[in-house]
Image (cartoon, grey):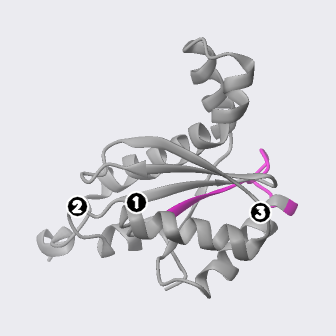
């Protein structure tokens, strides 16, 4: 299915279909999951990146276990809105993943998600060592929560357009 806009995802989702959030790094992939009502994003495990084939297998095993309907993946735009090398790497990762799965991907601007995740972990008085372990999944949760909030504002699932005439 490849990539969708957040609006297309809102039209496609059925009730009780969870969505996963991804924070793609060079060494790790942070994961988060929505609840079935798609109100809350919860940090999950961090995948240690090895090579694409193994990373994809691990991610798809996670998706099958959690019955993921879609992936929201952070797009690391520069602060001025331009796309740098990390954006290109993220798009290449998604292109490669769409050859392996029908689960759609939605790009979500992730500017400042890691900063917000770091602040939240600091406020919870998480030690530096624990923060480094949890930062990627916390960032994935910030990415996913932003998308969930947008989906909620759009109204999601079957019948969304039934009021529009």
Residue 16: which numbered mark, if any?
Answer: 2
Magenta-span inclusion, residue 159: no
Q: In the image, is residue 51 above or below residue 111?
A: below
Question: Dot 2: few (<14), some (14–19), or many (≥20) neighbours within 10 Å?
Answer: few
The residue most toward the right is 85
Percent position of residue 15, x then y: 20, 64
How far apart marks 2 and 1 lie (CA) works out to 10 Å
Q: Is mark 2 on a helix, strand or loop?
A: loop
Which circle's residue, 1 or 3, is located before the other in the chain?
1
Which circle's residue, 2 or 3, is located before the other in the chain?
2
How far apart marks 1 and 3 lie (CA) works out to 21 Å
Q: Residue at x 46, y 66 (%)?
A: 63
Q: Where is mark 1, residue-wise?
A: 19
Percent position of residue 17, x then y: 29, 64
Residue 87: which numbered mark, if any?
Answer: 3
Residue 161: name its quadrant.
bottom left
17 displayed left or right of 109: left
| Viewer-nearest residue: 4 or 73 | 73
Q: Give the range drawn in magenta.
A: 71-85
Residue 108: name its quadrant.
bottom right
Q: Residue at x 57, y 37 (%)?
A: 138
């Amino acid at each position: 299915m490849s990539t969708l806009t957040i609006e297309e995802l809102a039209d496609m989702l059925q009730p009780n279909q969870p969505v996963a959030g991804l924070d793609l790094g060079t060494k790790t992939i942070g994961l988060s999951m929505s609840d079935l009502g798609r109100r809350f994003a919860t940090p999950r495990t961090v995948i240690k990146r090895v090579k694409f084939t193994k990373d994809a297998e691990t991610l798809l095993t996670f998706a099958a276990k959690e019955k993921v309907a879609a992936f929201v993946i952070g797009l690391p735009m520069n602060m001025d809105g331009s796309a740098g090398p990390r954006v290109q790497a993220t798009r290449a990762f998604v292109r490669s993943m769409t050859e392996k799965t029908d689960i759609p991907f939605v790009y979500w601007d992730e500017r400042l998600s890691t900063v917000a995740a770091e602040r939240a972990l600091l406020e919870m008085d998480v030690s530096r060592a624990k923060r480094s372990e949890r930062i990627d999944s916390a960032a994935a949760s910030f990415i996913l929560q932003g998308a969930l909030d947008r989906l909620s504002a759009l109204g999601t699932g079957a019948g969304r357009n039934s009021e529009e005439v």
